[in-house]
Image: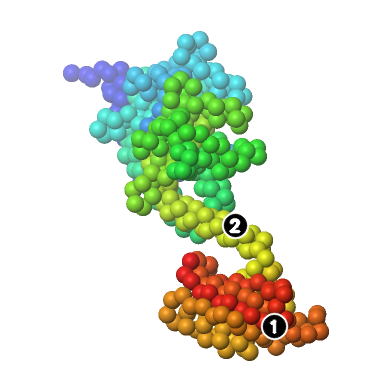
Amino acid sequence: MTADPTRSADALLDQAKRLHLAETLVDVSRTVAALDTLDEILASLVTMTAGALRAERATLFLNDTATNELYSRSMTDHGPREIRMLNDKGIAGKVFQTGRGMVVNDAYAHPDFNSEVDETTGFITRQILCAPIRTGRGELIGVAQVLNRLDVGFDDAGLQLLEAMTSQAALALTSGQRDEHRNAQAAKEMEFVDLVADITSEIDLDALLLRVMAEATAMLDAERSTLFLHDSRASELVARVAEGSNGVDEIRFPDSVGIAGTVFTSGETINIAHAYADLRFNPSFDTHTGFFTRSILCVPLINEAGDTIGATQALNKRGGPFTAEDEQRLRAFTAQVSIALENAKLFDDVRRVKNYNDAVLESMTNGVVTLDNEGEVVTCNAAGAEILGCTEDQIVGRSVHDLFDKNPGILALVEEVMATNESGSLMDVDIHVGASCWRTSRARSGSARRWRATWIRHWRIDSCAATRTFSGAPAPSSPCCSATSVVSPH
């Protein structure tokens, strides 16, 4: 029986196609297995699919589950370029949503075709072959798209080839995505650790607040961040400084008002995509600053003891609403910096008290000299310098034994108080200043000066040292020095 030559030729052609497909798939597997990064895999697959299907251009889109976008990457003269679009738009979006490939040989006549990409790039799309990318488990992870076949139009055979090639590369693509995500997370964690270590070394409260807000804004890709601290005495939330607020230094409002107030009172995170659609949103902040709030992510600021001490708020994430990952990162960030904020606030309070005390001391007519635990003079107010006949620079830093070396009674009292931490006093003591001040005093007046003085010791925090403060005042009518010394804890 003679074989049909036509049937034999068709069988040979079919066998050749199968062999070509097998060789192509083996080449795909071998090529992507030798690559390390997702960008390398994408670039290689683009070249291979365009070549296998004799097309002008090819693009692979992967799905970003966090943003519901399809993204592709390519190399340009200016470096890597990433294109993103919603995963339900255009031919690619239709294929991704339905999971079925499409052959389109008249792109502009198809209702799902999106011409915006052509308008942006200047490329003219005539034909489209688009196939879903599935893993071995059937999970849809993206789409592959080739444009403008160089000879005839695309057909179903080409679609089958494209689907086979992308399926062969799906494992490498998912592995590349996981590696990229893992490396990005590791880099973020290291950056986060370095950032927190750097921030927590700052003790100036205003500088720390600005730094925290700037870093939160950058970390979340937001337009602005604000940190509110709770003023327990006034039951208010206070923004000492608002990043990008054009000179607004402080904003106050009741601690139960608005999104920040709700977060502060409840201790729960709030993530709002549309601020003005939420009844809890307080628009007075926008009115006060001239800023327009679209989206809000606000987390409580909790200290090491578990107490809520404020709230951190990020506004207007670029490219869409804040994500669950953004919530986790902001909570972790504020948890770390809360300790630094409390330390800076304590330092700020101490500095305010010190400035107040310094102002009070400078306004006093009594002379006040403070000593550290080593017996060196830490401060001396103007009245004290005048009483001792010296300038403040001549007194500060000197030893009390040097300053009052001719006053054994005073030195004995100082040593007794330092040793026992008990109050003590001296009555009617002649004061003779140390040699350097004595010369200054004689140069000014030409004779020794005699004073009535009261000496008071107290304890206060000053550079982590307990200081002893003595105060004295001149006796205006006494021809000789009559001094009263009183030493008491304060």
Q: Position of residue 209 (x, y in %)?
A: 53, 48
Front position in the image: 347 or 85: 347
Q: Position of residue 137 (x, y in %)?
A: 25, 33
Q: Position of residue 398 (x, y in %)?
A: 63, 81
> Which residue sits at x=33%, y=48%?
306
Alpha carbon distance from label 1 to label 2: 35 Å
Q: Is residue 387 above or below residue 55?
A: below
Residue, disc 1: 480
Residue 398 in view: no
Q: Position of residue 12 (x, y in %)?
A: 30, 26
Q: Quadrant of the N terminus?
A: top left
Q: Earlier in the sequence, mark 1 or mark 2?
A: 2
Instruction: Assign a secondary structure to mark 2.
Output: helix
Q: Is residue 429 above or below residue 130?
A: below
Instruction: Assign a secondary structure to mark 1.
Output: loop
> Which residue sits at x=48%, y=71%?
488
Residue lying at the far left in this picture: please name it: 1
Amino acid, disc 2: Tyr
> Which residue sits at x=47%, y=33%?
254
Q: Which one is in front in this view, the residue at disc 1 or the one at disc 2?
A: 1
Amino acid, disc 1: Cys
Residue 356 — which label? 2
Q: How many marks?
A: 2
Residue contact between numbered discs 1 and 2, judged by CB atoms under 8 Å = no
Front position in the image: 1 or 277: 277
Q: Residues within 10 Å of mark 1 (few under 14, many from 20)?
A: some
Image quarter for residue 15?
A: top left
